[in-house]
Image: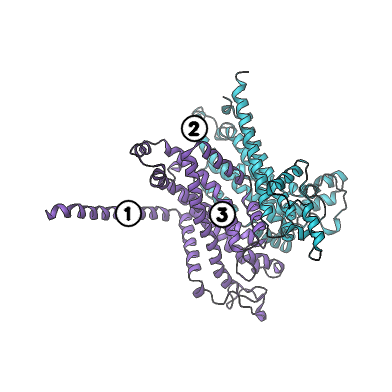
Amino acid sequence: MIAALPQLRRVSKRATQVFITLFGLLLLTFFIGRVMPLDPVLAIVGPDADHATYQQVYHQLGFDKPLWAQFGIYLNGLLHGDLGHALLTGQPVSQDILRVFPATLELATLAIVIGAGLGVPLGVIAAARRNGAIDYAVRVVSLAGYSTPIFWGGMIGLLLFYAHLGWVGGAGRVDFSLDGVVPRRSGLMLVDALLAGNATVFWNALNHLILPASLLGFHSLAYISRMTRSFMLAQLSQEFILTARVKGLTEWQVIWQHAFRNILVQLLTVVALAYGSLLEGAVLIETVFSWPGFGSYLTSSLMLGDMNAVMGCVLVVGLIFVLLNLLSDLLYQVFDPRTKV
Amino acid sequence: MTLSIDTPHVGAARERLARCQRFAARAGHFLLRMACNPLTAIGCGIVLLLCLTALFAPWIAPYHPLVQDLDNALSPPGAQHWFGTDEFGRDIFSRLVWGARITLYIVLLVSVTVGPLGLLLGVAAGYFGGKVDAALMRITDIFISFPSLVLALAFVAALGPGLEHVVIAITLTAWPPIARLARAETLSLRQADFISAVRLQGASPLRVLWHHIMPLCLPSVIIRITMNMAGIILTAAGLGFLGLGSQPPAPEWGAMIASGRTYMLECWWVVTVPGMAILINSLAFNFLGDGLRDLLDPRSE
């Protein structure tokens, strides 16, 4: 009971922090939405509407009320899961986002599998052979990953692997002829194809997915391999590693069983954050690949000046980030014995 | 009598000279060490080249960046046009050269606003602590909880497209990491004995911050800003690509890629060349920032 008290206090402190951050997030999106130079009423009623209609919609949207009251209405809507209606589809924004999100989730998940699957071993090897040829190569590759404009990488990839070599499918999630062949269940094309038992669609979807996912993965590989390297270097300079070597363990055992196991928690945090930041890359890469996901929805709403949709998307991204941060904090608390006082 | 008046003066002059020499020697040594690391040297060279290109754009560019020549539209790279021409027959090389000005304009303007802003807020939060610190750090938390491109996107969407708005949007998203860094540095300096000594001499908080803490935070903030520059280039290019940056006829690199997209499959150069320019420059800033950190950060040795 006594031992649980400081932990309780820490959790409640963290909870207040998250709450304040979330509240700030809402304030920020609300005010960005309000300084828009576009007239949201005009966007709904159209330029030909008469004065009475304009006034009616103006009142309906609550623009005659003071700002804080408008914020209250906005908050109240959010608590009921209402992000307003999108101009383009006429649907509630929340439904739109739920509809497009699986496509992005599929893309980002394969990307993080590629990024972490390659990035972690590369980082470990680079740290083990510090200042060697591999270390240098990993450093240059990861810097190149940091420096490539991802939309351009997507175009060059399409040019090379689709137009020239014909190895992968082009834009979109499946070939045009296969669109809508399998019924939508989870929204994840690969899973839906498996559920329907349709191998043709599965391979075709994978073929379309692999290029954008690899490009996104390359981006997170840069970050993950770099962080892995520095975590490993910190571990390898510790005395217990020296002890392990003196005991006569093989280099493999020293690196993977002694050093690597200690960085697992830190690594989980890094991968979680990299997963979240793939959303950023997705905004650009989805535009290039005509991928009907979250990023495409955000940019097309942006072009139309559909502020409800844009702010809904921004809010969702912020939410995902806050939650991922919280999750990685919790992971630390659960797995790292040093945080248990 | 004259001696007693002159001596301190001569002494001060000599002291100043010696200080200059020491500074020059240190700077020379620093540059030498920088040149020893090949990646840093390459990065430094490219950044220098970018600056010179932007400065002397009118003399370097063989053609006007905006004048159209529809007879020569989409002609491949050759002796006439080194990097080919775009869909309006404009010389891509000339547009790249002029575009260097836009890129550098964004990078510099963002850096000179973000640096002081982040430094001031971070130092204030770290030095005063308590409620000021809590409030400022919660604000940075909110801004950090967005990926910078998405937040910049939202700001530009609200402000409307345009070069100045891109600068404002990127500035608004780029200051929190700097503030956090400056705060951390200040926290470690605040307890130092020399700060207590200055305070006991009766220096006001403002004087302590301005004369004693800020100068010591400066090196790490400068490194951080250099490392951020690559990110600024990429975010700006991304916004330009989405059509939110400087508007069409302007030779902005990201916008050049976007407009070349339609002709990409037949004419590889309209997309490849501006992309290479972005890649090379952000790579150069990354090399430079990496090298500076290795040199200036004592922990890395």
Chain ID, mark 3: B
The total number of labels drawn is 3
Q: Nearer the viewer, residue B50 or A31?
A: A31
Q: Amino acid at mark 3?
A: Thr
CA–CA distance in space, label 1 to label 2: 37 Å
Chain ID, mark 2: A
Q: Which dot marks residue B171?
A: 3
CA–CA distance in space, label 3 to label 2: 40 Å
Tell which tag, 3 or 2, sits nearer the viewer.
3
Q: Secondary structure at mark 3?
A: helix
Q: Who's the residue at 48% across and 40% down the image?
A: B126
Quadrant where the C terminus of chain B sits is: top left
Callout 3: few (<14), some (14-19), or many (20+) C-alpha neighbours within 10 Å? many
Q: Amino acid at mark 2?
A: Gln
Q: Amino acid at mark 1?
A: Ala
Q: Who's the residue at 56% across and 27% down the image?
A: A338
